[in-house]
Amino acid sequence: MTPLEFDAHHLWHPYTNVADPGAMHLIDRAEGVYLYREDGAKMIDAMSSWWCAIHGHKHPEITSAMQSQLEKMPHVMFGGLTHHPAIDLGRRMVDMLPEGLDRIFYCDSGSVSVEVSMKMAVQYQMAHGRTRKFEFATIRGGYHGDTWKAMSVCDPVTGMHGLFRGALSIQHFLPRPQVRLGDDWPEDPALNGLEALERLLADKGNHLAALILEPVVQGAGGMYFYHPQWLRAARAMCDAYDVLIIFDEIATGFGRTGKLFAADHAGITPDIMCLGKALTGGHISFAATVTSKQVAYGIGNSEAGVFMHGPTYMANPLACAAGSASLRLLAEGDWQRQVADIEDQMRTELEPARGLPGVADVRVLGAIGVVEMKESVDPSVAHRLAPETGVWLRPFARNIYCMPPYIVSPDELGRITSAMVALAGGQQ
């Protein structure tokens, strides 16, 4: 049995039918923006391997930091112990984060970061005697991960987890903010979408622990960009009802939208922020849930006296070393110019897709490019074409999109946008 045959018979891939897994590429190595197949063909990773490899694959500074740490201490428990990699990464994060977010809880993955954030919000409310505030509000079209509580705040109809909606905690879903990024902001709450939030807070505010959402950019829920003024207004409204705000920046954090964090588009600081993906530059799984001194100390004053969570691999030294190297590259590099150049080029080169019969919309923000189709796109078509185009794309639902590494060259980016437009044209 060949490696690919074994894979097809025994290995379960994400969002894949095990009985019919479809085309599969056997990747032998990855470096820079390229994925190298075992047969020698190479493909540009237009996905940054699910949005995390912002500096490209196998970056020498990140791999060197990991190798050095591996020789010293791959892992040690974080309960009662600490280590320099955790401290060094924490210093870098505090210097980058929006002011006021300076308490860091390391965790394993983005979904776990969301779980931790929701748990934090509930324990904070309980510490203040608000024992009925354990429900959550969110906006439709969102995606927050595949673990149990995170699934409960993903869109229950159009999201990937609608199958489980009867088994999940019932949460409160608001209409997706209807004013798009770049459009004029109407002050009338009936027109800007805030009327629904006002009603929900008035009706259920004494039951809500937090409002959780992806700021400005909804990722896997549809690659939708909305107006940051909605967030500014929501911040003030939630404060009036003692409802915390959680920003899920797992996909948008560390420069992807052209700002260091998507929260910077709105100029506000959430009570809790979830981070992951690009935190280690895509070199190893890691995440963090960060919050304010007010929330952290509030939890400390609860009946338990401690936050009731502690992953085995919390603050894994190897991952912390990778994270420090990745954030150092951001701090010392020119990511703002790189992302701005990517945005400008994608705006120009994706625009022709707007005239194709099957295309509903084209939108670009930072290093995110989206061609939204009128009908669902079959990802297997893109998978089969990848060796021919030399570009790895993984469409979902109605979206053909890319989130390339920031180091992508103009020529490489041109190949990505050409492949996207050609794929869109072939969907008629």
Image (cartoon, rainbow, N blue to C red):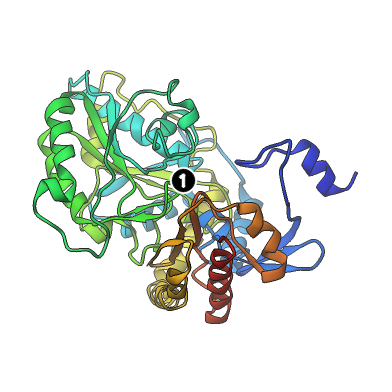
Is residue 15 in view?
A: yes
* Residue closest to the eye, 222 or 409: 222
Q: Residues within 10 Å of mark 1 (few under 14, many from 20)?
A: many
Look at mark 1 in the image and give the residue it sits on. 287
x, y (%) of residue 56? 57, 66
Q: At label 1, which amino acid type do we have?
A: Ala
Where is 417 relative to 225, above or below?
Answer: below
x, y (%) of residue 397? 50, 49
* Residue closest to the eye, 294 or 412: 412
Residue at position x 65%, y 41% from top? 16
x, y (%) of residue 149? 42, 29
Farthest right residue? 1
The reply, left or right, for residue 157 in relation to residue 133 is right
Residue at position x 52%, y 67% from top? 405
Where is 135 relative to 277, above or below?
Answer: above
Image quarter (top left, top right, bottom left or bottom right) of the N terminus: top right
**Numbered label tally:** 1
* Residue closest to the eye, 177 or 342: 177
Does dot 1 land on a helix, a strand or a loop?
Answer: strand
x, y (%) of residue 261? 33, 58
The reply, left or right, for residue 173 in relation to residue 416 is left
Where is 354 relative to 89, above or below?
Answer: below
Is residue 333 in view?
A: no
Image quarter (top left, top right, bottom left or bottom right) of the C terminus: bottom right
Residue at position x 71%, y 36% from top? 18
Residue at position x 55%, y 60% from top? 47
